[in-house]
Amino acid sequence: MPELPEVETIVRELRQDIIGRTIVAVRFLNRSIWRRGAPAKKHLIGASISSLERRGKNILVTLSNGRVMIVHLKMTGRLTYQGPNDRIRKHTHLVIDLDSGQIRFNDTRRFGYLDLVAPEQLDTLDYLSILGPDALFISREDFVTMVRSKKRIIKSLLLDQSILAGMGNIYSDETLFVAGIDPRRVGAGLSRERVGRLHQAMIAVLNNAIGARGSSMNDYVDARGEKGSYQDQRLVYGREGQPCKKCGRKIKREIIGSRSCHFCASCQR
Ligand SMILES: [Zn+2]
């Protein structure tokens, strides 16, 4: 499932590719992918792309008419910029023709969604307003205060989008390993110093993953259809039974807080 680094990669690429482009036609190949029904085409056609931003794992595309298209990739969604002659793959649900190239939304498992809202509606959307501070931008001080105020296990805290937006299973496992913290530890039971190190590890892991253009262990591709490469350097995620890169003992996989978790029981305390 795409997490912060994958979504950030897509947003950065699309900024280069589609800002300033004008929408000339729209094709709804599957209307059920729209969260509240497909919008009127007049709200899209004729507008140009003004800006792109990421909010948690959501992609927000702001148009020159003020409307905002929101895309959530969930498990297998892909948002790509392609040439008009590229073959339209199975499970493509939306094609937006620009004055040069196309934006396409493809989703095999259809857990992803699209939404188009007027600017005044943006702050009323439950799935955006619920989001906590962004994992990439939260200050060390705010992060330490947040973690130490919760009597919940740290793995669950990192994954809760209402507490911290953007993290998922891959980068929470990687972050806890880098910080040397056992995923089963309770936030309130960790020292300020250790939570500070966790914050530092999280920022480093996320930036490293953005630099690698994300992880492509499963379906993820970036906005240009290319795979990311973070999977080649991952430390614990998906490495169950393989030797720990620090101590050589086997990486464990356990279900913690209903999520699968990879860690080294020796290096993480
Ligand atoms: Zn180890």
Image (cartoon, grey):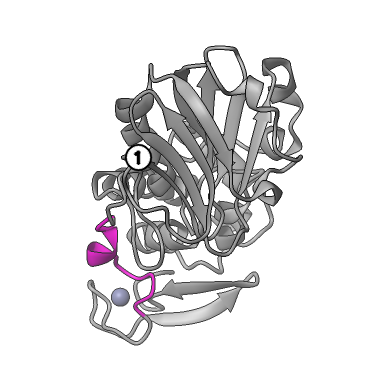
**Magenta span includes 34:** no
**Helix, strand or loop at mark 1:** loop
Identify the residue at image location x=62%, y=19%.
Answer: 67
Identify the residue at image location x=41%, y=78%.
Answer: 265
x and y percentages locating residue 258 in the rendered image: 65, 72
Q: Is residue 191 visible?
A: no
Q: Magenta segment range?
A: 228-239
Q: Is 151 situated left or right of 58 in this image? A: right
**Magenta span includes 238:** yes
Identify the residue at image location x=34%, y=62%.
Answer: 216
Identify residue for label 1. 84
Q: Count neighbours of disc 1 (C-alpha within 10 A) and say few if under 14, some if 14 to 19, many if 20 or more.
A: some
Residue 147 vertical placement versus 25 (above, below): below
Q: How would you classify the magenta stretch by its main secondary structure?
A: loop
Q: Is 25 situated left or right of 33 in this image? A: left
Label 1 CB-ligand 1 distance < 8 A: no
The quadrant of the rendering that contains the C terminus is: bottom left
x and y percentages locating residue 243 in the rendered image: 26, 82
Residue 114 vertical placement versus 12 (above, below): below
